[in-house]
Amino acid sequence: MMTGPVPATKGSDVDGNGAAQLVADHVLDVLDFPKPGIVFKDLSPLFADGPAFRQTVDAIIEAAPEFDLVAGIEARGFLLAAGVGYATSTGIIPVRKAGKLPRATHAESYDLEYGTATLEIHTDAALAGQRVLMLDDVLATGGTAQAAMALIDRTGASVIAFTVLLELAFLNGRSRLSGCPVSALLTV
């Protein structure tokens, strides 16, 4: 896998040869979704653009520390984890919403900026000592990421880095993830 520190450039944590601009060029603001007053950052155009998606995956891998598994948080984190897992021949852990996994699970509930939710992973998703790179599309308040990390910890594995495409710095979600390196391709 990859080794080395995560560089910080131009307001983002990951250089990735223009990754910040790539994300900025592909994000759309959707007003009042999923409820009035929320501005949803839609990265679907990035995922739909094959060359842009490939460049994004390459930027994540380039900046990542050495890892054994990739965890993707439902749902857009799955897309990133699939790309990174494929490119590095690494296994993937799906971090799912409650009730979506068929076998024994660990569950963790958390608060969102617009409600509450529960995440789950299979109890055997990772082995003790494995290093997990966690991926998601957006870091907002940090509740989802914090819950996902707690689930990985329960398996005995450890999240060695958390990477997102877009960080909403004004929501200060990074502060909830102390002890884990956090990187974003674009921070706004």
Image (cartoon, helix red, strand yellow):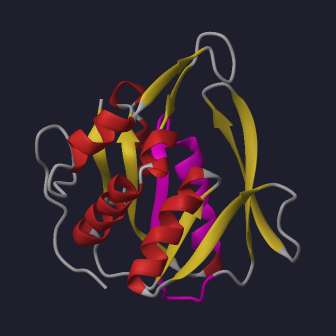
* Residue 132 in view, yes or no: no
* Residue 119 in view, yes or no: yes
Residue 74 location, quadrant: bottom right
Left or right of 60 in this view: 120: right
Q: Which residues are magenta?
A: 126-154
Give percent across and percent down for residue 159.
Answer: 46, 70
Give percent across and percent down for residue 78.
Answer: 58, 61
What residue appears at the point 58 percent right and 81 percent down from the top-left corner?
A: 156
Magenta run includes residue 128: yes
What residue appears at the point 87 percent right and 77 percent down from the top-left corner?
A: 103
Left or right of 157 in this view: 103: right
Left or right of 13 in this view: 31: right
Magenta run includes residue 113: no
Q: How many marks?
A: 0
What residue appears at the point 61 percent right and 83 percent down from the top-left corner?
A: 126
Q: Is residue 100 above or below residue 36?
A: below
What residue appears at the point 40 percent right and 33 percent down from the top-left corner?
A: 27
Q: Quadrant of the C terminus?
A: top left
Q: Is residue 115 above or below residue 36?
A: below
Give percent across and percent down for residue 186.
Answer: 28, 41
Q: Quadrant of the N terminus?
A: bottom left
Q: Is residue 106 above or below residue 22?
A: below
In the foreground, 147 or 51: 51
